């Protein structure tokens, strides 16, 4: 068992995807952080980090949204987010968006306090091993935003430390799943082909779940898979962490 | 304003507003670099698809066995080596361009070599004819073991002032047709090294 | 269904073509991975150093360019500058015409394609033959290259054999070895009959005044050894500070491009042939080309000029693998091309503004780039530039409504509640983006507001 951790005040960014589709992931994030002794504030006025418009290059549309997010998450507490892509927007994208603008300093301050969830658990709170049990053979999908960051390895380390979890490799793991936000609707053919290739590899062997730090990737892959008649069980890392604590059967909500 | 002035002034105008300019990084020859520390030249030549002969007689045997008896040899190759080669081979010491395809091999002197990669170094001063080293199917480079450098970074440091320095690493090749590797495209299909005898023939290690 | 040209092109590819490109790229990427990670303990450190050397050079390009020109001239080469494609073509034609050269042989240089040199020379009555096997096949089949290192990645042996038969190199034979031998014989005659050699350069070392040419086939060696006049056309961004720095780039280039430690031939050339050497040029010319590079240097995507044309980004790119190089409609395809092509197009930027959109921003290109170019950031910058200059992006949903809703909390919360209509919305009522999504995906169930309700209940339970 881990020794009790000092109480930490953190803010949680739920992410727009979890707000709209994946409430269980956001809920699991709250539960896991509180289990670790954190006092979690979830600012009510939060909306979206601004990435969808930022990525399309519509920076005039992105700025009001990102600015709003800077205001909502002001202060000096860590801001924890169960999404690698949102974390990257906060730590890297916002700097580009506000280059030479007056919000640059505020963006830089938030960048320093923004943490992807697994990264926060392992490097912020120093947790090396996760308690409890979760019996499952899983495939771990490294989302592309994890390039150059350390949270994918942090998530893997946590997963591998859970009794009962077996992480299996699959081929061409470096290839993008094809989501890319608006890319999936602007380039539907290429996006679908990329996703199909990914599914061919990931589903080549049977798993109990496909796991990631990003619901965007999982939404895309599971949506493609269900449409193609080969559904699979998708889980965010934090759902496994929560379920392992209660040693409950694998989460049935995807 | 001529194009030179035009381009340089555009460059200066492009750089002028930069708040800061990237500094030259300090780096060591070993930064991030190759794991292995000992380099075996002969093994590296073989890995690159070339061949090494330690004795002229063995080279002659190989060439005769293939029926490649007639070729070019640089007249400044050491007399004792040329003598040994002439026992079995028909050597011409002047390359005649209009008969280029009649030479089955070209024997020229190398200016040096690189152990790390199995590379032969040729230059205009020591290579009696660029075409002799290039056109025949077989190129034999006569390498003095004292001129073998250890690594690419060492060879780069010793490029010198010759106007044409050429590194050859194995036979010419292409994979343009369906990614299939074919050796012998425009250049030699066989890259051969003849090591001059100044050392124990059982091993070849670079001296620096 | 798709309104993006590159997506349409990908959808229209034959399965055969798609397989060639995908498997060829994958093989290239795997070879690179083996070579880089097999030989280097810290490859990322080496890439960072190479990137910094390049960036430093670009940030002081006036100094290094002048130094390179002065040293080359001191070494006996003649140096020219060409501000644009037209100037470059005229300069090179002029050099050849002054020598009464009628036949030129060319070793692969993308810059020559950029300025459409071969066609101009033909119009001046000068034959210009491509000698790189892939480029030769492209030239005689009237095609366009699809990769910067492997120009006929998209072709199979059958297509090449048919072309060779058509141009009279022999009866149909699609054995790769026979194809290669036939090209060897044909081009050898061309080398020996030619008056001039035209090549590019991979690097120009400023302190020593040397150009460096990296090849595998021996074609550039033959072009230069068999002729008396050597013309080098090279972009101004290819300069590097010192000879020592060459070591860093040479260690990275072949490994990144093809998984070799070194390519077969590396030529270091500083002037006409040495005294006593019977073969080779008595005249060497180096033409430094701008053609839009100074505009790139002045902009916010300057890092792209670090590129050393290794092709590693093409090999790893999932979009390139699906679409193939021809989808990019320009000399430079793939991730590097998606940045460079619209930029070099100058005032024709809008014609290529779809290239930066053809990416999921996965960043794999950046990860394999030997000079550490943050390509995914540059793609987003270019998307922003397109938006600011009013270029339309078909297929990308408008972000205006989203921007309003996502910056007003009450509007956001209302949307979370109302969004459940998405579950039951018939296709003909749904916005285009939603329809496009549903073509390929099943939608997840709408759960807007559920998390916030859960949170409120939890707080009440705890506080109550």
Image: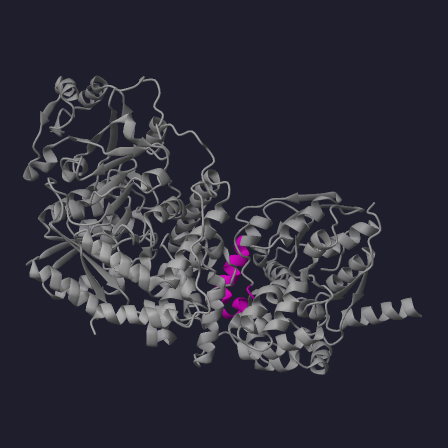
Residue C430 seen from this side: no
Q: Quadrant of residue A84?
A: bottom right
For this rendering, which residue is in front, B168 or B152?
A: B152
Give how far across and how far down residue C207 sits, in percent: 29, 52
> In which quadrant will I find the C terminus of chain C?
bottom right
Q: Is residue B83 magenta?
A: no
Magenta extent: A180-197
Q: Quadrant of residue A13?
A: bottom right
Residue C329 versus residue C285 in the image, above or below: below
Q: Residue at x 44, y 31 (%)?
A: B37
Q: Is residue A187 magenta?
A: yes
For this rendering, which residue is in front, B91 or A223?
A: B91
Q: Is residue A3 left or right of residue C310?
A: right
Residue B193 seen from this side: yes
Give how far across and how far down residue A120 sits, in percent: 71, 56
For this rendering, which residue is in front, A245 or B75?
A: B75
């Amino acid at each position: 068992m881990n020794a009790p951790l000092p109480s930490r005040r953190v803010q949680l960014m739920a992410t727009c995807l979890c707000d709209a589709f994946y409430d269980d992931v956001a809920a699991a994030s709250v539960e896991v952080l509180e289990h670790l002794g954190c006092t979690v504030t979830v600012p009510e006025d939060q909306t979206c980090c601004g990435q969808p418009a930022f990525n399309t290059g519509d920076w005039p549309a992105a700025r009001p949204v990102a600015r709003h997010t800077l205001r909502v998450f002001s202060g000096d507490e860590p801001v924890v987010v169960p999404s690698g892509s949102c974390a990257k927007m906060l730590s890297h994208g916002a700097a580009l968006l506000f280059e030479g603008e007056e919000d640059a300093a505020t963006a830089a301050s938030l960048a320093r306090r923004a943490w992807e969830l697994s990264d926060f658990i392992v490097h912020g709170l120093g947790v090396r091993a996760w308690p409890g049990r979760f019996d499952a053979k899983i495939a771990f999908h490294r989302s592309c935003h994890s390039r150059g960051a350390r949270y994918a390895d942090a998530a893997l380390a946590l997963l591998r430390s859970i009794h009962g979890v077996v992480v299996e490799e699959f081929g061409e793991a470096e290839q993008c799943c094809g989501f890319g936000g608006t890319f999936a609707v602007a380039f539907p053919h290429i996006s679908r082909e990329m996703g199909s290739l990914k599914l061919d590899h990931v589903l080549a062997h049977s798993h109990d779940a496909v796991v990631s730090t990003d619901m965007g990737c999982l939404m895309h892959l599971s949506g493609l898979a269900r449409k193609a008649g080969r559904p699979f069980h998708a889980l965010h890392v934090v759902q496994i962490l929560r379920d392992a604590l209660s040693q409950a059967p694998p989460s049935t909500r995807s | 304003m001529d194009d030179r002035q035009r381009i340089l002034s555009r460059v200066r105008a492009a750089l002028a507003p930069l708040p800061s300019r990237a500094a030259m990084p300090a780096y060591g020859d070993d930064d991030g670099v190759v794991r292995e520390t000992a380099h075996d030249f002969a093994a590296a030549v073989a890995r690159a698809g070339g061949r090494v002969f330690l004795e002229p007689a063995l080279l002659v045997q190989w060439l005769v066995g293939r029926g490649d008896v007639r070729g070019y040899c640089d007249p400044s190759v050491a007399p004792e080596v040329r003598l040994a080669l002439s026992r079995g081979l028909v050597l011409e010491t002047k390359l005649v361009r209009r008969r280029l395809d009649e030479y089955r091999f070209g024997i020229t002197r190398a200016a040096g070599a690189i152990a790390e990669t199995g590379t032969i170094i040729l230059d205009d001063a020591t290579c009696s004819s660029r075409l002799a080293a290039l056109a025949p199917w077989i190129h034999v480079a006569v390498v003095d073991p004292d001129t073998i450098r250890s690594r690419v970074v060492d060879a780069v440091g010793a490029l010198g002032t010759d106007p044409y320095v050429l590194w050859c690493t194995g036979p010419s090749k292409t994979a343009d047709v369906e990614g299939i590797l074919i050796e012998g495209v425009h250049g030699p299909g066989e890259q051969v090294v003849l090591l001059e005898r100044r050392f124990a023939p059982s091993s070849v290690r670079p001296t620096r | 269904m798709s309104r993006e040209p590159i997506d349409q092109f990908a959808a229209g590819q034959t399965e055969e073509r798609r397989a060639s490109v995908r498997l060829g790229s994958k093989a290239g990427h795997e070879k690179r991975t083996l070579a880089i990670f097999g030989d280097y303990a810290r490859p990322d450190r080496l890439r960072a150093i190479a990137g910094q050397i390049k960036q430093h050079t670009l940030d002081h390009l006036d100094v290094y360019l002048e130094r390179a020109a002065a040293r080359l001239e001191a070494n006996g080469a003649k140096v020219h500058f060409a501000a644009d494609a037209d100037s470059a073509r005229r300069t090179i034609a002029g050099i050849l015409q002054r020598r009464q050269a009628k036949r030129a042989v060319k070793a692969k240089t993308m810059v020559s394609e950029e300025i459409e040199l071969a066609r101009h020379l033909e119009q001046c009555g000068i034959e210009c033959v491509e000698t790189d096997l892939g480029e030769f096949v492209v030239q005689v089949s009237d095609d366009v290259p699809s990769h910067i290192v492997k120009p006929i990645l998209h072709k199979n042996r059958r297509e090449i054999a048919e072309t060779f038969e058509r141009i009279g190199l022999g009866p149909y034979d699609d054995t790769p070895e026979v194809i290669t031998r036939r090209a060897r014989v044909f081009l050898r005659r061309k080398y020996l009959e030619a008056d001039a050699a035209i090549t590019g350069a991979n690097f120009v070392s400023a302190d020593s005044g040397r150009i460096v040419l990296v090849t595998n086939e021996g074609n550039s060696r033959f072009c230069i050894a068999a002729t008396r006049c050597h013309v080098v056309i090279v972009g101004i961004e290819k300069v590097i500070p010192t000879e020592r720095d060459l070591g860093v780039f040479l260690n990275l280039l072949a490994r990144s491009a093809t998984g070799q430690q070194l390519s077969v031939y590396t030529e270091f050339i500083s002037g006409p042939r040495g005294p006593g050497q019977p073969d080779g040029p008595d005249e060497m010319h180096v033409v430094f080309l701008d053609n839009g590079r100074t505009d790139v240097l002045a902009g916010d995507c300057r890092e792209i000029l670090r590129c050393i044309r290794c092709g590693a980004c093409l090999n790893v790119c999932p979009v390139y693998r699906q679409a193939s190089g021809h989808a990019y409609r320009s000399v430079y395809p793939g991730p590097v091309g998606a940045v460079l092509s619209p930029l070099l197009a100058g005032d024709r930027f809008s014609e290529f503004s779809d290239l930066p959109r053809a990416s999921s921003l996965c960043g794999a290109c950046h990860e394999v780039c030997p000079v550490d170019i943050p390509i995914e950031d540059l793609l987003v910058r270019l998307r922003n530039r397109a938006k600011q200059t009013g270029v339309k992006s078909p297929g990308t949903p408008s972000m205006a409504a989203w921007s309003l809703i996502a910056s007003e909390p009450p509007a956001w919360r209302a949307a979370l509640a109302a969004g459940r209509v998405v579950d039951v919305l018939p296709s003909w009522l749904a916005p285009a983006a939603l329809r496009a999504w549903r073509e390929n995906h099943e939608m997840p169930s709408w759960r807007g507001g559920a998390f916030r309700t859960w949170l409120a209940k939890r707080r009440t339970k705890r506080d109550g």
